[in-house]
Image (cartoon, grey):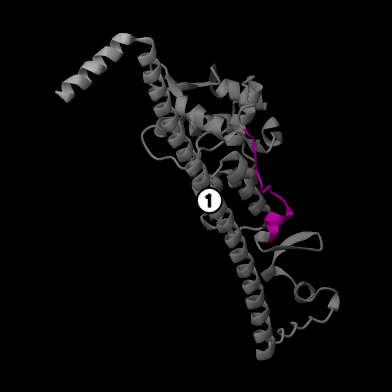
Amino acid sequence: MDFLSIPEFYFRILVLIFYANAKCCVNHDGVVTGVNSYLMGKKISLDVKSICEVFKLEDEGLDDENALGHVLSGSVTALNAQDRILHLMVSWWLRPSGGKYSTIRQVDDFWIRCFRERKRPNLARIMFAEIVYLVQHCHTTLVTSFTYGTTLSYFFLQKDIDCSHDFPTPLTDPIGERSLARGKFHYFNGRWLRLSKLPSEAVAQLENPQGEQVPQAPPPPPQPSMDALMTFLNEQFTGLRTDMASGFTTIDTRFTSLETRMTNVENRLTSLEGGHNSMNISLSTFHDEWRNSMRNDDPIMDEDEDDEDGDDDA
């Protein structure tokens, strides 16, 4: 079965787009026979047959998760090591729970009992039914967890969907010995047992490995004296005064440079005013010279001026 060997990562954005664009295909009897969606401009169809082909599953076995009734419930602390591993496999891979790994759901009970009683569940039809449920409800209600992200991501790759534009998000917490350790299981004499089931010598060995003495906590560091504190504060204030003096010196230099620039501007304005006065004098001189030259060259202007003088005498 290829289902348990698929890569442990998923394309988050592509999974969301798949569910957002997904539509259910219904036959004449009102039964959903497939799901169609669009990814990266390409149509993608998903049904029980395609799931079986991609993940090498067989379309047979129990597909009703209520067929065996319900026995187990409550917290996973009631499970032994074997059932704890089975519960992690079910809640992580076979029937993703969306983060609820500390409680036993009804579907968890169904799968654990299938393993115990050697009954074959129809994973392909159960998976398809869960995806159909999410497609039918994600457009009308708030869905906080889209399950089968790694499964759908592997399905996209097998259907030649271009996934290069979405960054693969890895599963950061794989199932292993650390999972059992977090579940308060300890390995002793070839078996994983809870702390309450361990013999006394094993408990003593866990509490004090290799029989070594438990090291004492180091003493607290000594508190600084008042003299040391005052010395430290004086050093800080001295550095602050030096920095402030350097800053004021820089400001004075900049103001001196600004005053020099203002003086240069005033000198240029004075020079410009002198040039303007010189230009006025030159224009006045040019005007007088022009009138004199016109008088010398035009006798009529001279007679008119003489008549004006005569009239003035009369």
Q: What residue type is labelled 1?
A: Thr
In the drawing, does residue 112 fall left or right of residue 272?
right
Q: Which of these two is toward me, 301 or 43?
A: 301
Q: Is residue 173 magenta?
A: yes
Name which residue lies at 73% across and 85% down.
219
Element under disc 1:
helix
Answer with the quarter of the image where residue 84 lies.
bottom right
In the drawing, does residue 126 fall left or right of residue 279?
right
Q: Which residue in the structure is indicated by mark 1?
A: 263
Name which residue lies at 36% across and 34% down.
140
* Name of the residue lying farthest toward the front: 314
Answer with the quarter of the image where residue 93 lies.
top right
Residue 269 image position (x, y, % from top left): 48, 42
Name which residue lies at 81% across and 73% down.
209
Answer with the quarter of the image where residue 90 lies.
top right
Magenta residue span: 167-181
Q: Which of these two is toward me, 90 or 314?
A: 314
| Figure quadrant of the C terminus | top left
Name which residue lies at 62% across and 74% down.
241
Q: Does the magenta stretch include residue 153?
A: no
Q: Residues within 10 Å of mark 1 (few under 14, many from 20)?
A: few
* Name of the residue lying farthest toward the bottom: 226
Residue 148 image position (x, y, % from top left): 57, 36
Can you see residue 146?
yes
Can you see residue 121?
no
| Figure quadrant of the N terminus | top right
Q: Which of these two is toward me, 77 or 208?
A: 208
In the figure, 28 relative to 71: above or below?
above
In the drawing, does residue 117 fall left or right of residue 46?
right
